[in-house]
Amino acid sequence: MDDLFDNIPAPTDSTSRLKELREEINKHDRLYYQEALPTISDAEYDVLFRELEELEKKHPELHDPNSPTQRVGGAPLDSFSQREHLIPMLSIDDVFSHEEIGEFFARLQRNLGIERIPVTIEPKIDGVAVSLIYRNGSLDYAVTRGDGTRGDDITQNVRTIGRLPLSLGPGAPELLEVRGEIFMPNAAFAKMNEERDEAGLQTFVNPRNATAGTLKSLDSREVAKRPLDFLAHGLGAYDGPALDSEVEFHKLLDTLGIPRNQPIWKGDSLSEIIQAIEELDIKRHGLAYGTDGAVVKVLDRPSREALGATSRAPRWAAAFKYPPEQKETRLKDITIQVGRTGVLTPVAELDPVFVSGTTVSRATLHNQDEISRKDIRIGDTVVIEKAGEIIPAVVKVVTAKRPADAQPFILADFVNHTCPSCGGPIQQADGLVAWRCGNFACPAQAVTGITHFSSRKALDIDGVGESVAIKLVQNEMVKTPLDLFTLTEEQLANMEMDAAILQSGDISKPRRLGEKKAATILTSLEKAKTQMPLNRWIYSMGIPHCGESSAKELSRLHETIFDLADSQLLKDLADLPNYESLSISKRKKENHPVLKDYEIDDSLGPVAAQSLVNFFKSDAGLHVVERLRELGINPKSDNYAPKPSEVDTSDLPLVGKTFVITGTLSKPRPEFKKLVESKGAKVSGSVSKNTDYLLAGEAAGSKLDKANTLGVTVLDEEGLEKLIGA
Ligand code: IVH
């Protein structure tokens, strides 16, 4: 350890040692992230880091939000505050062909009155736009694009991104607004999704969604665990030595250690632009992040200023969107996948082809109608592309290449009217194209059913994701989700999991699930059994048309699942005449007795009601009720209050009063809404002459003005407390 500190002068006092440590760690962060050339080992780095943590703990007065120790995240927020952009964050106009890029360039030539215009061409990063404000070399705050004028302050979350420097070295200008994209590198995304699946967590659809979802988290400690990255692509507000061209801006970013988007091409004619766009098209699938376009930008700042912007986008930039790559391949076969609700989905089995960065060997064909409409036959040569660059799809058949023996495909005949997973009979519901397997214990349905049952929003069974569900069903340990409650720790711990493909590309040995994971699963199951409220149980059943909000409304109207199973209310709802043509809220206005008595909200429509009635009549539904009784599980509603008219509200202090809530308050607005509603008041979104009170927080805007004009009583939080006698 002595060696390590050889080159660091002896600390004079805590302040200077602290400064030294922060600088030293920043330097190593930079060597590690920017240059990929670490000069110390992880262990040595940890020693420095821990010393800094200790010192900071001893000296809270020397706290710095941009200290490297702050990258692990801080206390969760109640909500994001909003910030106005110093300069609006605009969009870019898209162009879709060489012809359109030609028109763009011709417009530049016309407007600037010159032939050759220096431009850059670079990948369009498929991420989330962010504006970073550095003042005097220190990250002040970070904001999302929002509506272009104001966005969310996501500074806490952004601080966790390792590649992004929190303090800049010498040469930092007074004010520097760096604009760029936050994204998740493709490889890190794939690894994270795999781990989430193993842990029984929901996986993300694509890196962009994962990034956007992560940045919306109010808990930066969670954000710190996600593999986010950042690349700069533009300058916003700036106060420092003149930067006349983008090249100088790039140099500044490099000096300051702010990572910037590359590769980047330069050119000053249309042919060079088109050449760069074509070169990037070849390169782009090898980039760390997703990209579906090339951004072309005028290089000189004075030219940019001369060109200006429309309200939507600058005139000096255009984004060329690559058409989705298409490839021809042979459709070898069609197989059938059975989903959670028993729907049979035809899947094209293809000769593997490389499309938009990955090898594709399967693509969904959706349903019989789709196959018939496109006249897809087994043996055909088909054109494949990735919809949204992600999900492979069959675009069309190359009929000229159709072999004489190509086989037309009729789903029901193909499977002999039986489910390919369990051999049970299949049916097609009236008016629907989809064929379904009616056997609730069908293994294919079991896997998706168990995965849904265990998902976060359902019963949150930690440790049961798709791969565990597959094994449980393959080993015949579980036939339906409720069978999970019969598993023992020993059974689970000894269950063999498949070998995994490691990041290195090696294949791991098959392994047991192990005691630790088994215990986690059993603990979550016990919690589900004893603590999860009725609405989560209803949602977990995966009943068609019954989502989270209808489940909540159902648990308001029913005390237990057994009440729900023979609910007269649901039958009445489902029996409403012509129900497809009128929404519940319209019917309420017509004073329909069922709806009037119960004040059912639109989240529980007649379609959902009919689906629930069908479910509880079906084998699957009858089985659920029976199995719950056998297992002694009886989840209770935590919001049961069937008929609002039966609840005596007459002595609540705010009965008959209407509130509007605005501005920034000490807690999120929904909490205040709940509070005043619990006192009998109604909350409305806009101020009118019927408004009784406006609860106004800081920076209240037009609503406050309107309330004042209409003479509506305006309350602050203290005033509200007095009013309700809290
Ligand atoms: S330059 C205002 N360069 O795309 C135009 N933008 O669709 C200057 N984006 O808001 C933006 N990669 O967040 C630029 N290499 C890149 C980009 C890029 C992604 C985003 C950016 C912009 C959005 C417009």
Image: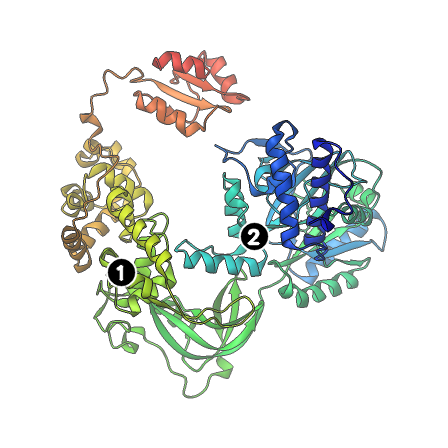
- Of helix, strand and loop, which one carries label 1? loop
Label 1 vs label 2, nearer the camera: 2
Give how far across and how far down residue 366 sits, in percent: 39, 66
- Of helix, strand and loop, which one carries label 2? loop
Above/below status of 708 relative to 192? above
| Rendered-image quadrant of the C terminus | top left
Can residue 137 be seen?
yes
Give the numbered dot on residue 431: 1
Nearer to the camera, 94 or 217: 217
Give how far across and how far down residue 529 sits, in percent: 24, 47
Residue at 26 percent across and 57 percent down: it is 484
Amino acid on which disc 1 is placed: Gly
Question: Residue pushed farthest bottom?
Answer: 404
Q: Quadrant of residue 603?
A: top left
Nearer to the camera, 624 or 472: 472
Position of 498 with respect to 586 (left or right) is: right
State the CA–CA distance, disc 1 to disc 2.
Answer: 46 Å
Q: Is the image coloured rainbow, by chain, by secondary structure, or in one colour?
A: rainbow
Give how far across and how far down residue 451 sits, in percent: 34, 58
Question: Residue pushed farthest front?
Answer: 2
Residue of label 2: 227
Nearer to the camera, 675 or 712: 675
Nearer to the camera, 185 or 554: 185
| Label 1 CA crowd tier, 10 Å (few <14, some 14–19, many 20+) | few
Above/below status of 48 relative to 679? below
Residue at 20 percent across and 26 percent down: it is 645
Give the numbered dot on residue 566: none
Number of residue marks: 2
Above/below status of 593 relative to 468? above
Q: Which sits earlier in the primary sequence, circle 1 or circle 2?
A: 2
Q: Quadrant of residue 174?
A: top right
